[in-house]
Amino acid sequence: LGDKGVARIVDGLDDPCRKYFKLYLCDNRIGRQGASAIAYSLKYNTTITELSLGNNHIGDEGARYLASSLMVNYSLEMLNLENNNIGPAGTSAIANVLEHNNNSLQWLVLSENPIGDDGAKAILRCIANSSSFDHLLQCNHNLLSVILKKVTKVKDTTTLKKVQSYLKINRSSAPSPTSAAKHKILML
């Protein structure tokens, strides 16, 4: 399919007579240009709830494009970016948006990406920023799952364990973000 094929598919998403809810584009040789086209479409699409882009080549730049769309897209609930060569910069861009601008995404798959320690810390900060009480209250308490299987370049596995602990609190406290924040405060 590649980037050019994705551009054609994205054009079809704008058809007001059709509503698409799930878009699966795994294993399609999609790069940063394809990710850019998808991100642009997501800024205006209000129906897609699941986007699966696993096993492509979007990299950090493509991840940044998708992160920019998450600032204004409030319908997407699941995003699969497994095995896309997304490093710390791309992971941090997505985590930053999820911490400050997006509460609709509930499932994020980043497995088999070289996120590194910085990317893992960005995910942790997104769901449990303990730099201050106010930051912790404003974290993303709606994110229920971040799948990080076989991520590479992570030396400090404690961060990954903390991410899973805080996500467990989010799941057990759903749909009450205030309750999740209170439980996280008790863990500090």
Image (cartoon, grey):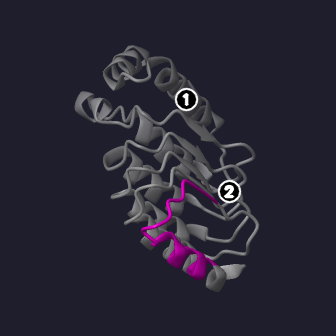
In the depicted structure, whether residue 177 falls above or below residue 8: above
Name the residue that disc number 2 marks: 113
Work out how far the residue at label 2 is from the one at label 1, CA to CA, in angstroms.
19 Å
Q: Is residue 45 above or below residue 125?
A: below
In depth, the one of 150 and 47 nearer the eye is: 47
| Local SS, label 2 | loop
Quarter holding the C terminus is top left
86 or 143: nearer the viewer = 143
Q: The magenta stretch spans which residues?
A: 6-23
Task: From the viewer's perspective, tell me whether residue 95 is left or right of residue 28.
Answer: left
Callout 2 amino acid: Asn
Residue 100, image x and y in percent? 31, 47
Query: Given the image, on which type of amino acid does mark 1 rest?
Result: Lys
| Residue ID for mark 1 | 162
Q: Is residue 32 above or below residue 132?
A: below
Residue 46 quadrant: bottom left
Direction from residue 175 to residue 117 in the image, left or right: right
